[in-house]
Amino acid sequence: MRSEFFRHLRAGLAAIILAGTASQAGAAPAHGIAMYGAPALPPDFVSLPYANPDAPRGGAVVTGNVGGFDSLNPFILRGNPPWQLADLTHETLMGRSWDEPFTLYGLLAESVETDDDRRWVEFTLRPEARFSDGTPVTIEDVLWSYETLGTTGHPRYRGFWTKVDSIAQTGPRSLRLTFTEDDRELALLAGLRPILQKSQWEGRDITEAGIDDIPLGTGPYVVSDYEINRHVTLKRNPDYWGRDLPLRRGTNNFDEIRIEFYGDDTVLKEAFKAGLVSYVREFNAEAWATQYDFPAVARGEITLSEIPHGKPSGMTGFVMNTRRPPLDDWRVREALITAFNFEYINDTLTGGRQPRITSYFSGSELGMDHGPATGRVRDLLTPLADTLPPGTLEGYSLPVGDGTARNRTALRRAVDLLNEAGWQVQNGRLVNAEGTPLSLTVLLQQDGLIAQASAMMDIYARALERLGITLKVEMTDKAQYAEREAQFDFDLTMMRRSLSLSPGNEQTYYWGADYADQPGSRNLMGMKSPAAEAMIRAMLTARDRAEFVAATRALDRVLMAGRYVIPIHQYSVGRIAHKSQLKYPDDRLPIYGDGIGFLPEVWWFEANE
């Protein structure tokens, strides 16, 4: 693990180097842009701090996905493409460093320029930037990509486009975007739109693309072979234009990346043990401690690596659909959270090895302080006091069980909350004033967490049964799940929201009222909170880190006090079991830890002696 001393030393030196130019950052082209302050890396940086610029190139890696695919176009709503595809085959104007909260450096663009208020941003393309067919990337390609993805592309691209007032060419290799509102993150988000080739789609509708219509990209890999629902093979482009860029040195080292598809996580893990898959990520601490002692590990053929990180916990748990009564009543949601005996479940399923998430941003400086709100956090929330869920200002913490299977004290409290909400037990069933029994359905899909989630629900169902509540678990395949989730056809379902050290516009998509009733949105709980939206606006307009942190902590309070999710484990460390030939720079780990920007991006193949 890297030394914190050298991390701070490096950042300090970079700040000194850039101090002379920081005042001009809003008026001159720069090599990078940070959400707050200056980029940590100087203009002449050699490589990303967590990459090995001398890493050997070659070899192949096989990774496994659960489920299937029927599309190789990750930029439209139609179809299910492999989730890794966009990052490996396509590039954006700027590239992210995963060792800083939110900083971008030039990729397809050689420079970025913006004003002090960040109401506009301008990019200048690199003359050497090329698509995989060797044709140059032009301003026309960029303009077409922004408009096409913003109007007819996947919904994740459309929110940004609604905030663009104009986009126009300003020079032979430059373009400028101006924005409709005060939102300092937009200048960075503008650098993260994928660039497609306009001429490939001339006279054709990209939204109707078939499996053979693979979008041309500028990235280091191209699709070389595939079989629907079986595998996709990516080969490193030998003529890749950007291989010598500082942002790319020591990255994308494998000659081939093959994605194999398996029906469920158990089959995938068995394929790994048989040597058919190069690595797997393990999310269950108990399984990590007890199920990775098979012969290949003992022989040294498999290495078990743990990758720490400094990002927020995010939220993993069972989200409640507030569009449906009685889940629109916070008291019922609090009762359901109280009845979820996490301490007993955690001990039973993980041996108590995985701590619980305590808030959406827990484990980072962005997480709320427990107890009453104080200082700037209280100042931000007080004007909205009449809209806040109970406990937002006073302080809210998850109920704690007694660790026993019966969990009597917690269940008594749950009964009191349900009674207060108008529910009473009659003939062993919990009913409302009309005599309608309380019955809930949990929707789960077949994925890597299904076994653990299903086991949790089995224990939970027995607890709810003692309250007179019926809990039914419905498990569906990926396609059925996607459709039902998109239509919010569930009472509870599994939710995972990974959150960064620089949350921004995506928070509106997660929690905003405009998305609460939009089919396919990420606002699964259906929350409509003026306070949450006000805190997100405060985050997006903050001029310094301190104000941003206060606004995020205030948002964290609103989310937790809303009692929308039954939180489960946090994943404070990444666990990767991999073939011993796969190496990574273990002395210079990024603050974001494991992810698509780590494995496979900065790993390499090293043949055993």
Image: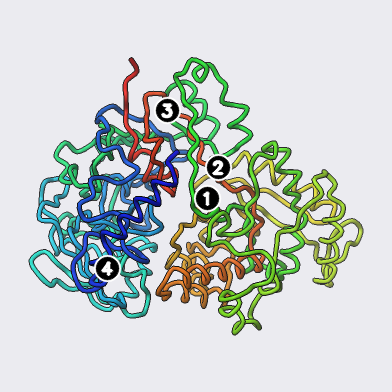
Q: Give left or right: position of 362 versus 121.
A: right
Which residue is label 4 attached to? 22
- SS label for mark 2: loop
* Percent of width and height locating residue 568: 64, 50
Residue drawn 29% across the image and 60% down it: 16
- Residue 563: which numbered mark, if any? none
Image location (x, y in percent) of residue 224: 24, 36
> Is any part of residue 125 visible from this angle?
yes
Whether residue 231 is situated above or below residue 468 in the rendered picture: above
Q: In this view, does 404 lie to the left or right of 122?
A: right
Residue at screen point 71% across, 59% down: 398
Residue type, numbered disc 2: Gln
For disc 3, the marked residue is 277
Hey, which quadrant is residue 588 in on the image? top left
Q: Locate the C terminus and report the quarter of the image it occupies.
A: top left
Q: Give above or below for 252 relative to 496.
A: above
Query: Is label 3 in a helix, a strand or a loop?
Result: loop
**Secondary structure category for the residue under label 4:** helix
